[in-house]
Amino acid sequence: MTRTLFLIAAAGLAFALPATAQEVPEDLTVMPPVPDTYQPSLTSWGEPDLRGSWPINDIADLPVNRPERYGNRFWKTEEEMAAEQGKVEALEEAYEVEDEQSTIGLGHWIEFEAGVRRTSMVVSPTDGRLPDWTDEGRRRSALMRSSWLIGQTYDWTNDFDSYDRCITRGFPAAMYPARYNNGLRIFQSPGQVAIVIEMLGTRVIPVGEGGHWPEAVTGWYGSSRGRWVDHNTLEVETTNLTTGASVFSNGTLGVPANNTTPVSEQAKVIERFTMVGPDTITYEMTHEDPVIWTAPFTLRVNWTRDDDYQMFEYACHEGNVQLRGYINSDRARREQEYARGLMLEPVGEDAGPPPAMDPAAGGLKRRED
C-alpha cells in the first residue's frame, strides 16, 4: 500500500484542498451539486476514461453518519480543521517511526488520512444521517450473526457474517473505506467496466443495452447494468442482491453497529461515477430498500487518483483457521463457565461496536460515531 497525506494548512490560513476537489461554499450548511463542467479524456472507443487506481484512504476518516456536534453543516469550519492538526501530525509521526525502525506494523497496516473537510458521507437526508430502519429491518438485523456482536456465542460457520468468512464485505459496503486495503482499480473495455476491490472481490459491470438477471438469480454484488449519461458520468443500477451480508461493514466509520445492517430482496442501488477533474471521481450512491429503511438515502465522496498505489493479495485469514479458533475457544470458555456455575450475561441493547485499531492512538481504541 502507498499513501498520500494531504496536510492541513496552519491555523488562520486558508485550507488547501486537492485542485479538483469540490470547493467549500461560504454557507457550510449547503452541499453544492456535483460539478459537470469537466471534459474527461476518452478511451479509443469513445467513452469517458475512468481507468486507473483510486485508493480511498483519504476518506477513511470520514463517517457515514454526521456526528451531532456538527448540527446541520455539511462542512467543518476552519477552526475545527485547525483543531484536528494534532491528529494529522500524530499519524504522520506514527508512519515515520515505523519507516525509520523498519517495523512496518500497525501504522502502515491500518492507514487513513486525517483532515477531511466534510462532516459526513450522507448528503441526503440533509441532516447527514441515515434514515431509521423499519420494524422489519430491525427484526432482520436481530437475526443476523457476526463476530462484531459482543457476547455472541460461536458454534458453526453460520455464526459468522460474510466478511468474517472472507466471502465479501457486502454491497455497497465494499465501495466504502475500511481501515486498510482500500484500493480500487478500474478497467474498461468496450461494453464493460470492471472494478477490482483490494479487499474481497471484483465487480464486472456490463454497459449499454441489456436487462438485469432473472429475479431468482442473485449475487453478493448483484446484477449491475451501466450507462453513460451527460458527458462525464457512468451511472450504474444494481439489483438482485443476495441477502445476508451487511449493507455497511464496521470497518467504515459512523455506521450502524455490529455489522448487522440487513439487505432485502427489494434493494436497489444507483451509483454515479463522475469525472470532475483529471484525478478526481465524485462517487455518489443512492440506496433504496423499502423493506429495511423508512426512506432512501444518498452518500457522496470524492476518489483521488494514485496510479502509484500497489495492490497485493488480500489473504484474509492467515492459514484460514480463524473461524475454527473462534469456535473452539468459545466452546472451551462456556464449558469452563458452566463448570464453575456461571452463566453468560446478556448483551445490552446499547452495546457498542468492538474496538477499532487507530495508529494515532498507538493501539486499540473504541470507535466513536
Image (cartoon, rainbow, N blue to C red):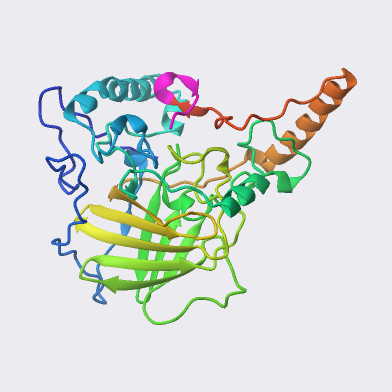
Residue 312: % across, % down: 47, 46
For the N terminus, give its image quadrant.
top left
Residue 127: % across, % down: 32, 43
Residue sitting at x 16%, y 27%: 9
Residue sitting at x 58%, y 51%: 135
- Vertically, is 104 above or below 263? above
Q: Quadrant of residue 79?
A: top left
Residue 159: % across, % down: 71, 44
Q: Residue furthest right?
A: 339
Residue sitting at x 46%, y 49%: 198
Q: Quadrant of residue 296?
A: bottom left
Q: Is residue 105 visible?
A: no
Residue 334: % across, % down: 82, 27
Side of 148 where 124 appears, left or right = left
Q: Is residue 367 in the magenta section? A: yes
Q: Residue furthest front?
A: 135
Side of 271 where 133 appears, left or right = right
Q: Quadrant of residue 96?
A: top left
For the C terminus, give its image quadrant.
top left
Side of 213 where 342 appears, left or right = right
Q: Nearer the viewer, residue 5 or 157?
A: 157
Q: Nearer the viewer, residue 88 or 319?
A: 88
Magenta range: 359-369
Q: Is residue 155 visible?
A: yes
Q: Is residue 365 in the magenta section? A: yes
Residue sitting at x 44%, y 29%: 368
